[in-house]
Image: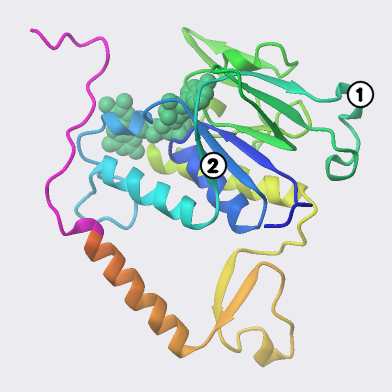
Amino acid sequence: MSDESESVVVVGGGVAGLSAALFTARAGLPTRVVSAGEPILARNAHLENVPGFPAGVNARLLLEMTRDQVDDAGAEFVDGQVVDVTPVDEGAADQDRSDDGAGFTVALEDGRDLSADCVVAASWSDATYLDDLDLGLIDRGSKRYVDVDEFGRSAVDGLYAAGRLAGTYHQAIVAAGHGATVGRTVVEDSEVPFYNDWVAPEGYFTGRGREVPPGCEEIGEAEWQRRADRSAETMREYFEDPAVEPPTMHPSVDDDE
Ligand SMILES: Cc1cc2nc3c(=O)[nH]c(=O)nc-3n(C[C@H](O)[C@H](O)[C@H](O)COP(=O)(O)OP(=O)(O)OC[C@H]3O[C@@H](n4cnc5c(N)ncnc54)[C@H](O)[C@@H]3O)c2cc1C
């Protein structure tokens, strides 16, 4: 990761935040995921509507696999409750963030401050730390959502929202897909010369006299075979132990009854 790349703090380590972080970290943006508790998906008993798992998948295992993937991509995990997000220089909001050093201070409950050029709020169901920003928070019943455009950009430059907090449907793949869109948008809005996050077979671009575009990779047969073998071995390890963690019950259910 380059020190000059724009830094990203993702608030919330559920599927939306993790998916956003996967894309920003893979694009080389220094990325931290701050999370203060269990993702809501940990309450699911068996997850049957995520593409790619024909017999469903244990939700806690899926979360563990996704966290490992984000870790491998280079993101850093920080345990902590975010209590405030403050623009460093409100007057610089319309300027180029990577040049002027403007951005955000992300305050944690334990007194730590993190600085970030961009913040992705993926912290269903807490938006209280955004109260002082002129964001356009939407109240529906007891729930509060962040008003964003179709790519997850909020009314404050550099501040994005993803997943259920941004009002997506309440399904894991929807929240994850939205997180990916938002992560990809953060990359698009940054200085990274980025085209796509693709791995193509050798010759796909160069065989047509084209350069491999930034953010893409061409790999030959030995390498895709090596990656396929590693993938099979990795998945075997994750799935070899059928013992699964029990789901987390809703906090209002009384265990004594
Ligand atoms: C019982 C149950 C069963 C479900 N079953 C299914 C199913 O079968 N299929 C399906 O598709 N979906 C299911 N869902 C819904 C699915 O889990 C959610 O839609 C999806 O996981 C939302 O992801 P998210 O990343 O937006 O939010 P979350 O997973 O809630 O992630 C938000 C994270 O942010 C953290 N956070 C909150 N505030 C702060 C803060 N201030 N600072 C730092 N961190 C913070 C939270 O602790 C959490 O870890 C189920 C949900 C429940 C409750």
Q: Is residue 75 left or right of residue 64?
A: right
Q: Position of residue 41 (x, y in %)?
A: 33, 33
- Residue drawn at (67%, 51%) of the image: 29
For the residue pair 82 and 147, the one nearer the viewer reads as: 82
**First in residue order: circle 1 vs circle 2:** 1
Task: Specify whether residue 235 is in view.
Answer: yes
Tell me the crowding category of disc 2: few under 14, some 14 to 19, or many 20 or more residues within 10 angstroms, Cα based: many
Quarter of the rendering occupied by the N terminus? bottom right
Q: Is residue 54 left or right of residue 27?
A: left
Tell me the crowding category of disc 1: few under 14, some 14 to 19, or many 20 or more residues within 10 angstroms, Cα based: few
- Residue drawn at (39%, 81%) of the image: 226
The amino acid beneath tag 2 is Gly
By what rule are the colours in the image chosen?
rainbow
**Image quadrant, ligand 1:** top left
Q: Which residues are magenta?
A: 238-257
Q: Which mark is residue 179?
A: 2
Q: Is mark 2 within 8 Å of ligand 1?
A: yes
Q: Secondary structure at mark 1?
A: helix
Q: How many marks?
A: 2
Q: Is residue 218 left or right of residue 193?
A: left
Q: Which mark is residue 91?
A: 1
Quarter of the rendering occupied by the C terminus? top left
Name the main secondary structure of what is drawn in magenta.
loop
Q: Position of residue 152 (x, y in %)?
A: 64, 36
Q: CA distance from mark 1 to mark 2?
A: 28 Å
